[in-house]
Amino acid sequence: MSPATPDPKSGGAALELLVHGVGGATAADMLDDPRTVRVTGDRTAAMHRRRDDVDAEDHPERYADRPVPEAYCWSNLTSGNGTRALWLLLLPFMVANLAHWMRPATEGHAGLVRLYGVLVRLVALSLTVLLTAAACEVALDLTAWQCAGSGPCAGQRSWLGFLSAERAGWWSQPGRRLALAALVPTALVGLLWYLSNRTWSAYEAQRPPTGYETDPATPDAPAPGTPAAEAPAAPATTAAPVAPVDTEAADSEAPTELRPALGRPGFWYGRRLVARLRAAHTAAGFLTVAAALSGAAAGHDQRALADSAREAIGWTVQSGIGVLAAVVLWVVCRRGRSEHRLDLRIERAVVSWLPATALLLLALTAVHTAWARPGWRSSGTLPGDTVFGVLTLVQGGLVVALGVVALLLHRPRRHPRTALYGLGGPAVAMLACALGGVMSGGVAQRVADWLDGPGTPGTGDGLITGPPVLLSWQASVIPVLLLLLLIPSALLVARTVLAARRLRPVVDADYGTEDPDRLRTGQIAASRARAGLTDAAPVLVGVVSGATLLLGAASVAGAWASDNVPGRAFDGAHPAIASAATAAQALGSWMIGFGFLLFVTWGRRAYKDASARRTIGILWDVGTFWPRAAHPFAPPCYAERAVPDLTWRMSSWTRQTGGRLVISGHSQGSVLAAAAVWQLPPATRGRVALLTYGSPLERLYGRWFPAYFGPASLRDLHRTVHCWSNLYRSTDPIGGPVRVPAEGDRPAVDRDELLDPVAYGRTRRHPLPEPILGHSDYQADPAFADARSALLDRLPPALPRQRDDEPQLPDIPRQETAPRQAPLP
């Protein structure tokens, strides 16, 4: 991304703060100079300048006709090293977290808003239980129970020899094999806890500006109809209170004013909620392992005559699991986010004692399961394999309930641009459950195939019984789902071709060419038509989610009705039907395993390949913008570091210099820029202009996250910031207009649509063919410099520079990435 051409009129000190978009960019690229200096920040995220501009504030005469360019590089927050590529395995958690933020915009309805948040958090909790159950299926059922209990299977694998039932060793008893295998899912839950706690320290622990930076004495005007957060807390200052709009939190005091959601002091500081959810999900994982162990032991003890001591311990363990499970549900449902103030409280009893108690109970369960039971033999599948069917039904019920709540919230304030009529959140929650099922089933299917050798698990001709029947049914519906997707895919292709034909005369009219080139016109029209596919994404997501819900219900019904895999369930039916069922089972098993292996392979490749790592980083740039409000094991929210960084920089620079500032954001950088502007105090916003280009603020965020970037919120941002301009192209598949009209003396935000390419054919100014840029290189268009100049000229002149006797920014560890570290202006 090349820097803008400096040409605004003189108005005193001016700073252009550049924020790059998805995929990242280097400071040298953003500033068009290899000699860059990090002026503040660290290796993860930092502000950079050209070496010649480091002391710009001390020499204002050099910048009378141009702003000082400064680049904020944040790409290392999402794609900095290879280990972050393994976050792909947390994709279901990330998608579930997105569903929380897709709540429809509403006015009032505090109870429904709270219920929506509770349902999403329960869906997220079910995914943690599903992941742990899948690990238990692999380690406890397939390996320790089935393969180690089968002489031929254990005999082919020397590493299982000491567990083999045929050797009659100390570990050969089923309970002891299960207790030892339980270390695998327990370690997985512990690893997730560790990763969440580690990223918590790096992201959620970054406090947003406080004190004079938040300017509590001059509260912002509320956005019309903007609801409060799910969990309002007591405000930092007191004034005439208003009626609370939500009652999720225990905090009963209402906020003094209703700020837009993204402008609330605690929005980018979710430390308290993440700590609560992390404790609850960790405990849920440990309890899932404990339930798998106790279920197996209880099944044997009910058939045999157990001694009184062992029976008493068994009842105690199962009662403890039930009680702690109820506590986990209470913690998850009790409260949501606190946003109206900087909530620094941490509930030590919940955060520390809940997972520790669950782990202690798991250890007691393992001891009870390993108790000597001489007559115990393992056969068939591990008792309790119906958990996958129960989880599928629970997830389906939660998604349906979430859909009903979303429709009730959307109905009073319908807007045609809202994705899926307000059902975006439930649809995405369904996709999260489907992804969790595919990944869990893929692991189980692949491990079963590996252990079973040449046999086919579930058909009775192999060394082991295989995974639960439901997993085979769920794998079998994947080919059916892909066939169903062929219809909307074909329709989209046909729609794109027809749109490209319709756009040909429009392209010729836009460029006013007298001698149109059919090839050139076709290329431009096709680029515009392909860019329009983005607007069809809601339809595709809705079709996939609806089909997944119906096919998931059908798979549960088929598994429970037949109690057999699809290849055996249709024995005796018409040959065509039986062949189709067998083919679907084989193909689905292969595809579900291949999908999981693809995730692992992609992650390994990204660990070594920087370009692949950047591609994966783009996924997280979009998916991890939002704080972890539903699932604590989701990849961390980089905006909880980036937004405070930008807010600190804008507040400190304008306060110290009294100058003008234009924050210039491309693509995802425009979303960060808008969020940072919302966090600024009114006095600072009066000296800040916002320039967005290639921006998904309305096209993506406004449609899918209407409660936070809907029309009312964007209009409020227009009124809040001193001035705002947006640039877009019809060939851009990501960015678009923000659709904020003129209001009073404020012009419309969207400028005229930029032509792409800037020249149709060869001209004296452009003797060589110009490329179709699409989403990139907005600054190469002369309109960019014009828009930036107009914004700077509309800002008030710079104030006299203040003495450097104000509170300073906190110390930031300096790690050299450039020839030298410049002092903070």
Image (cartoon, helix red, strand yellow):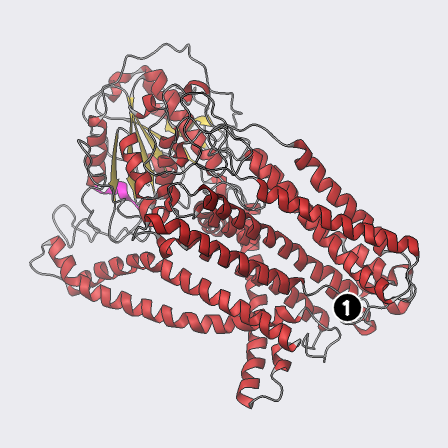
Give me the residue at 39% from left, 37% from top: 672
In magenta, the rendered stretch is 776-781
- Say whether residue 824 is left or right of residue 362: left
Residue situated in front as seen by the camera: 597 or 517 = 597
User: How far across and how far down the image is residue 103, in percent?
Assistant: 43, 47
Mark 1 crowdedness (10 Å alpha carbons): few <14, some 14-19, many ≥20? many
Q: Is residue 695 magenta?
A: no
- Say whether residue 510 is left or right of residue 154: left
Q: Is residue 778 magenta?
A: yes
Q: In the rendered structure, which amino acid carries the disc numbered 1? A: Gln
Q: Quadrant of residue 603?
A: bottom right
User: How far across and how far down the image is residue 753, in percent?
Assistant: 20, 47
Q: Quadrant of residue 694?
A: top left
User: How far across and how far down the image is residue 58, in percent?
Assistant: 33, 15
Q: Secondary structure at mark 1?
A: helix
Q: Is residue 631 above or below residue 157?
A: above
Q: Is residue 136 above or below residue 58?
A: below
Q: Residue furthest front?
A: 243
Q: Is residue 631 above or below residue 268?
A: below
Q: Is residue 673 above or below residue 304?
A: above
Q: Is residue 373 visible?
A: yes
Give me the residue at 16% from left, 58% from top: 507
- Say whether residue 353 is left or right of residue 726: right
Q: Is residue 443 visible?
A: no
Which residue in the protein does label 1 denote?
Answer: 146
Quadrant in the picture for the N terminus: top left
Residue situated in front as seen by the camera: 38 or 257 = 257
